Image (cartoon, rainbow, N blue to C red):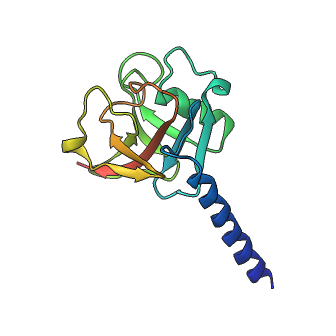
């Protein structure tokens, strides 16, 4: 009986999630929000109200991750590259369950094209929710947050 109840609850959660995302329109994230998704953990979508998060003056993906570490169960590490604790061009060395080995690295994608579009040579675009996400090729301290941004992390290889 317990197994049946768990399966029914899981099915209801899937149905409710489908209706919730169907009402989002063209974007998986709404204005004033940022969403963070990590490969291998699709059921764990971090949604941040950017106004409540009160980002630093830099207002970057690095700041967003710092906020999630303070308020959620997300952990990450990054290489120091430049000034500050992690630097302007900080690159992730691990996030959540993603721990690259050998010739792998953590790349991130977002739904706002970066000034330097390197997606053609670095990684194929991905789809999360209804958004097409582009490989940034930049450090987490270099990409500015904007309303409705969706950030997706995955392990890539050289």
Which one is in front, 103 or 29? 29
Residue 2, position in %: x, y?
80, 81
Q: In the figure, is residue 132 to the left or right of 1?
A: left
Q: Position of residue 87 (x, y in %)?
A: 41, 21
Q: What is the residue that sits farthest to the bottom in this orientation?
A: 1
In the image as oriented, which residue stretches furthest toward the right? 1
The answer to whether residue 101 is above or below residue 76 is: below
Residue 132 pos. (x, y %): 38, 47
Q: Is residue 148 above or below residue 39?
A: above
* Picture residue at 57% right of the left edge, 37% below the top: 30
Rendered view: 74 above or below 6: above
Nearer to the camera, 61 or 131: 131
Q: Nearer the viewer, residue 53 or 130?
A: 130
Q: Quadrant of residue 144?
A: top left
- Residue at image location 41% in from the left, 41% down from the top: 93
- Residue at 58% over, 58% down: 43
| Quadrant of the frame with the N terminus | bottom right
Tell me where residue 113 appears, x and y as whole percent: 33, 33
Question: Which sits in the foreground, 79 or 139?
Answer: 139
Count of labels in the image: 0
């Amino acid at each position: 009986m317990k197994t049946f109840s768990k399966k029914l609850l899981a099915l209801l959660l899937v149905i409710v999630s489908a209706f919730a995302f169907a009402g989002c329109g063209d974007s998986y994230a709404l204005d004033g929000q940022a969403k963070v998704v990590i490969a291998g953990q699709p059921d764990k979508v971090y949604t941040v109200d950017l106004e409540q998060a009160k980002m630093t003056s830099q207002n970057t993906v690095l700041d967003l991750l710092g906020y999630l570490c303070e308020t959620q169960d997300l952990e990450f590490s990054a290489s120091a590259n430049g000034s500050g604790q992690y630097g302007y061009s900080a690159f992730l060395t691990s996030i959540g369950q993603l721990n690259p080995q050998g010739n792998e690295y953590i790349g991130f994608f977002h739904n706002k094209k970066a000034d330097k579009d390197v997606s053609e040579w670095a990684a194929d675009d991905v789809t999360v929710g209804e958004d097409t996400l582009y490989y940034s090729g930049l450090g987490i301290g270099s990409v500015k947050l904007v309303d409705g941004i969706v950030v997706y992390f995955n392990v890539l290889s050289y």
